[in-house]
Image: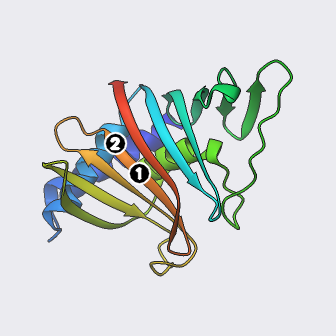
C-alpha cells in the first residue's frame, strides 16, 4: 500500500511540476495531496454538525489518523456521548464504551452516519477525485477549496464532499458532505497537528 501511495505522490509531483496547462488552484491541490500522502499521522479536533432536515446534532470529536486508513475517534461532546471511542482500520470497526451503542441513523441514501464523516473527508482528501478547485477567502485569509465527487457525477447529484485547506500548513480547516446538493455534514477542524 505504501508503494501505491509513493507512486501516487510521484505522479502528483510530476503533474504539478509539468503544469500541463493546469490552473494555479489545480497545481496547489496536487501539491497539497502530495503532502498528505507523505503524512505519517494527523490529529486534532473536529466540530461536526449533522443535519437530518428536521433536527440537528452537534458533536465534538478528537481524532488520530494514520494513513492509509487507520483512525481512532473519541467523542467529547455532547456530554451524554462523551468517552465513546471508535477504532477503524481497513474496513473493520470497533466501538469502545461501557456497553453503550451509538446509533443516530444514516444521513444519506449511501448510509453515511455522523461518525463516518471525519474518515470520509480524510479519505476524500487523500484519494478522492478532485472535481473542482478554487482559491477562496475564509475569515480574511486565502484558502484552497477542493470539491470531491465521482468523475462521472454531476454537481448536486449523489454524495459530494468539499474541504477548505490552509495554504500555509496544507491542513484542512473545514469540510462538508452533501447529498443531492443538500449539506448534511459540516465540520470545522481545530488544533490539527501532522507528522511526516
Q: How is the image coloured?
A: rainbow
User: What distance separates the C-alpha of mark 2 from that of mark 1?
Assistant: 7 Å
- 82, 135: nearer the viewer: 82
Disc 2 secondary structure class: strand
Q: Residue at x 48, y 78 (%)?
A: 156
Disc 1 secondary structure class: strand
Side (left or right) of 127 relative to 134: right
x, y percentage for residue 64? 51, 25
Examine the image and state in which quarter residue 44 appears: top left
Q: Is residue 127 above or below residue 195?
A: below
Q: Residue at x 58, y 52 (%)?
A: 50
Side (left or right) of 131 relative to 149: left
Examine the image and state in which quarter residue 194 appears: top left
Tag 2 and tag 1, C-beta contact below 8 Å? yes
- 58, 72: nearer the viewer: 58
Residue 85 seen in the current view: no
x, y percentage for residue 13? 24, 48
Q: Residue furthest front?
A: 54
Side (left or right) of 25 relative to 150: left
Which quadrant holds the N terminus? top right
Q: Residues within 10 Å of mark 1 (few under 14, many from 20)?
A: many
| Label ID, residue 71 | none
The mark tally for this picture is: 2
Q: Residue at x 53, y 33 (%)?
A: 60
Residue 60 seen in the current view: yes
Side (left or right) of 130 relative to 154: left
Q: Is residue 21 above or below residue 46?
A: below
x, y percentage for residue 126? 43, 47
Q: Which residue is mark 1?
A: 175
| Label ID, residue 172 | 2
Amino acid at each position: 500500500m505504501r508503494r501505491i501511495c509513493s507512486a501516487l505522490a510521484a505522479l502528483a509531483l510530476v503533474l504539478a511540476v509539468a503544469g500541463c496547462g493546469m490552473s494555479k488552484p489545480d497545481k496547489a491541490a496536487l501539491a497539497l495531496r502530495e503532502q498528505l500522502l507523505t503524512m505519517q499521522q494527523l490529529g486534532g479536533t473536529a466540530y461536526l454538525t449533522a443535519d437530518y432536515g428536521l433536527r440537528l446534532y452537534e458533536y465534538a470529536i478528537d481524532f488520530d489518523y494514520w494513513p492509509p486508513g487507520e483512525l481512532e475517534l473519541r467523542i467529547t461532546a455532547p456530554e451524554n456521548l462523551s468517552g465513546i471511542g471508535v477504532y477503524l482500520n481497513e474496513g473493520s470497526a470497533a466501538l469502545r464504551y461501557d456497553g453503550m451503542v451509538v446509533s443516530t441513523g444514516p444521513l444519506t441514501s449511501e448510509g453515511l452516519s455522523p461518525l463516518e464523516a471525519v474518515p470520509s473527508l480524510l479519505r476524500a482528501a487523500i484519494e478522492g477525485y478532485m472535481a473542482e478547485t478554487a482559491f477562496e477567502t475564509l475569515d480574511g485569509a486565502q484558502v484552497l477549496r477542493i470539491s470531491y465527487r465521482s468523475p462521472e457525477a454531476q454537481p448536486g447529484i449523489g454524495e459530494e464532499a468539499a474541504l477548505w485547506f490552509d495554504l500555509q500548513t496544507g491542513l484542512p480547516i473545514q469540510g462538508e458532505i452533501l447529498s443531492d446538493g443538500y449539506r448534511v455534514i459540516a465540520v470545522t477542524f481545530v488544533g490539527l497537528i501532522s507528522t511526516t
